[in-house]
Image (cartoon, helix red, strand yellow):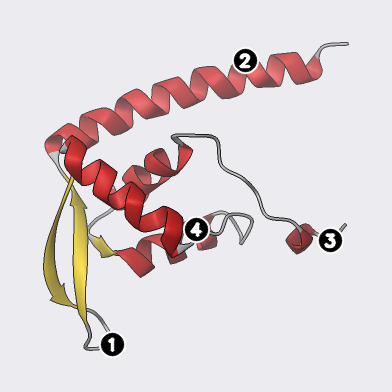
Amino acid sequence: MAKNDFQTDLLQGTLDMLILRVLNRGEMHGWGIADRIEQLSKKVLSVGEGSLYPALYRLQDQGWIESEWGVSDHNRKAKFYRLTKAGKKQLEVEQETWDRLTLAIGEIMKSA
């Protein structure tokens, strides 16, 4: 099976963490966030609108991101999202949790 012949399902909550991580570098509009995740994952991860926007609304409801309307590079009206102070703290928590989880999974995968 070729690398692009499958769709990678994200663990519950992983998309939220990835969005927070991408926004840690600065504000972006929704399509830019999805595109950046795809770029950074070397096209292994693809985030559709049906997953992205509910996640953005959820993160906004949590107070971890905020948004305001602006104009995109293509002169289109777009909502731009940015991390809040609470979002930066949450990203640190998510990073620590992810590090522990991947270490534990790696140990299991190396075992006989």
Q: Nearer the viewer, mark 1 or mark 4?
A: 4
Image point (71%, 14%), residue name:
107
Nearest to N terminus: mark 3 or mark 1: 3
Nearest to N terminus: mark 3 or mark 4: 3
Nearest to N terminus: mark 1 or mark 4: 4
Report how far apart the C-alphas of labels 1 and 4 lie in the structure: 21 Å
Which secondary structure lies at badge 2? helix
The amino acid pointed to by label 2 is Ala
Q: Would residue 108 be found to the left or right of residue 89 on screen?
A: right
Report how far apart the C-alphas of labels 1 and 2 lie in the structure: 44 Å
Residue 35 x %, y %: 45, 66
Nearest to N terminus: mark 2 or mark 3: 3
Image point (78%, 58%), residue name:
3
Q: Marks 3 and 1: CB-CB under 8 Å?
A: no
Q: Is residue 99 above or below residue 112?
A: below
- Whether residue 70 is visible to the viewer of this picture, yes or no, is yes
Nearest to N terminus: mark 4 or mark 2: 4
Report how far apart the C-alphas of labels 3 and 1 lie in the structure: 34 Å
Q: Which mark is residue 2?
A: 3
Tag 2 residue: 104
Tag 4 residue: 47
